[in-house]
Image (spheres, grey):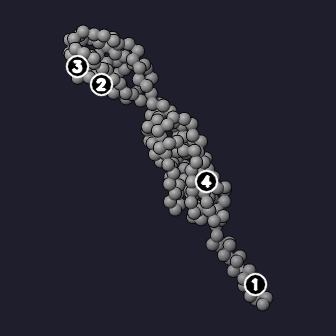
Amino acid sequence: MRYIKILFLLTVFLFSTNHIKAQVCITPPANGSDDQKVCNNSPIVDIIYTLAPDVLGALATNLPTGVTGAFTTGQFRISGTPTVSGSFTYTVTVISLGICTGGSTATGKIEVNPQPTPTFTTGPASVCVNSSGNVYTTQNGFSNYTWAVSAGGTITAGGGSTNRPVTVTWTLAGPQTVSLKYSNAND
C-alpha cells in the first residue's frame, strides 16, 4: 500500500510540475490598440486580446454601438464601426478552467468623437448667373478637403485636398450648392 501511495504522489508531482504551466488568462494587445480614438462612423483598429489555452469563452461589456467582440480559441477580437459618439471604457471577462493566472478581466477605452461639421467662414450667399470669382472658405486645422458644387457651378480655383478656399463660377439660375467634407486629427 505504501508503494502505491508514493507512486501516486510522485505521479501527481510530475504531472503538476511538468504538464501544467500557469499562463496569464488574458493579455492585452502589445500594439496599444486597446486604447484608441476614432470618429463616429469610422472603423476602429481591431483590438485582439491573447487568451490562455484553458479559457473557454470571453465577453465584452460597454462597447459602443456598432462594435462587437468575438471569441475564438486563443483570442478575443473587438472590431467594428461605432455609430454613436462618447467615451466607452469596456471590460473583457474570460471564463476559464481556473488554471490560468493574472485575473479574468481586462479593460480598455474607445473614445468616439463626432464627425467634424464643415462650416464656411466666408462666401457669398447670393450671386448672379455667370458670376465668377465667388470664393468660399472654411476654417483652419483640417485636412483632406473634398469640395463639390451642384451642376450649376464650376470650381475654377482651389478645391484640392489641401485647399481651404475654393473659387466657383455659377452658370445656372436657381438654388445651387457648395459642399465640403474634411478630416480632423481624430479621423
Q: Which mark is residue 6?
A: 1
Tell me the amino acid under the disc marked 3.
Gly
Binning the other alpha carbons within 10 Å of mark 1 as few (below 14), some (14 to 19) or many (20 upward) gives few
Q: Position of residue 101 (x, y in %)?
A: 66, 59
- Circle nearer the N terminus (2, 4): 4
Disc sitting over residue 152 in the figure: 3
C-alpha gap between disc 4 and disc 1? 40 Å
Where does residue 95 sit, x and y in percent of width and height? Answer: 61, 60
**Label 2, on which residue?**
148
User: Which is nearer the eye, 54 or 9?
Assistant: 54
Q: Amino acid at mark 4?
A: Thr
Q: Is tag 4's residue or tag 1's residue first in the polypeptide sequence?
A: 1
Residue 96 placed where, x, y %?
A: 62, 62
Residue at figure coordinates x 20%, y 11% from the top left: 130
Q: Is residue 143 left or right of residue 151?
A: right
Disc 2 residue type (three-letter): Ala
Mark 4 or mark 1: which is in front? 4
**Which is nearer the N-term, disc 3 or disc 4?**
4
